[in-house]
Image (cartoon, rainbow, N blue to C red):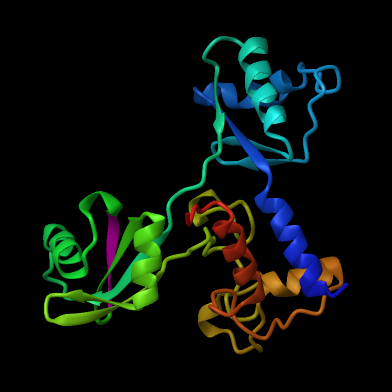
Amino acid sequence: MTENRQDEIKEKKMDELYRVIIKPRLEENRETLCKDLRKIDLIKNDVKIINTKRIKSGLVVEMKRKEDGDKIIDLIKTNTEDGKYIVETLTKRKPQIILYGLNNEITKEELENCLIKQNDIEKEDFVIVHNYKVKYGTNWICEVNGKSFKKLVGWRKVNIGFEKIKVREYLKPRQCFKCWRYGHKGKDCKNKKICVRCGDDDHDNENCQKNIMCANCNYQNVKFNRNIDSKHSPNDLNCPCLQNEIKKVKKYIYYG
């Protein structure tokens, strides 16, 4: 079996997992979460867990069977103090799109009106999330339902006033701009600051003259004996590690 085929099968299995998120209701309960979970006898209750992941807000538990997820929810509610933890199914979010380089003067209301009247999008089908200024205008991020997503991304451009505006899917994994690893932000980072150019931690990147080396891809090569091309920066859009993180993000998006 080829490596690509093995990856496809692995991704399909990951998509079929049932996920439950457990969050402490109060900050002081965060330290007792694992202690309370250890009191639950998974074997006695015939619950099979595939994986657990620590996240900033709590813990994600992954299972193959929905009934295991339902049991986990019931067990936590009956074996911990009432209201101590928030336990819920981790649902997929709607896809997001990015509209590139709009006029800086356009308002949120004007953009909504253009999407509705010029592009036949229903008001309830989208929500404008936020925007940010770039060199040539302002980029806008919108959350849309599956039907409108396929329509707009398929067009590749939308009508906004007298302009044709480029539209793409918006996928941005959380990346730290201190250590360049994924899954957290710089303000929460406990790692050493990494040079974005060469990946070393003993100097600032402003005056670095070393060869370009992606710290993330180099880590994969050293840690797991892989052979990934690492001759690029960790914020390169074609970085293999970034593309892998994008795949992970897409697992939590509902395109239906």
Q: What residue is shown at x 35% (from left), y 78% (from top)?
A: 156
Front-most of residues 228 and 20 = 20
Q: What residue is shown at x 82% (from left), y 71% (from top)?
A: 222
Which picture quadrant has residue 68? Answer: top right
Q: Main secondary structure of the magenta part?
A: strand
Q: In the image, is residue 214 above or below residue 8?
A: below
Q: Does any portion of residue 179 appear in the rendered image?
A: no
Residue 200 position, x and y percent, is 67, 74
Which picture quadrant has residue 208? Answer: bottom right
Q: In the image, is residue 175 above or below residue 2?
A: above
Front-most of residues 146 and 216 = 146
Q: In the image, is residue 97 above or below residue 26?
A: below
Residue 114 position, x and y percent, is 15, 66
Q: Is residue 122 left or right of residue 169?
A: left
Front-most of residues 64 and 99 = 64
Residue 123 position, x and y percent, is 21, 52
Front-most of residues 222 and 55 = 55
Q: In the image, is residue 195 above or below residue 39?
A: below
Asked whether 46 falls inside the magenta stretch, the response is no
Q: Does any portion of residue 202 appear in the rendered image?
A: yes
Q: What residue is shown at x 75% (from left), y 69% (from top)?
A: 219
Residue 106 position, x and y percent, is 13, 68
Q: Quadrant of the N terminus?
A: bottom right
Highlighted range, magenta: 128-134
Q: Is residue 84 left or right of residue 47?
A: left
Q: What residue is shown at x 55% (from left), y 59% (from top)?
A: 250
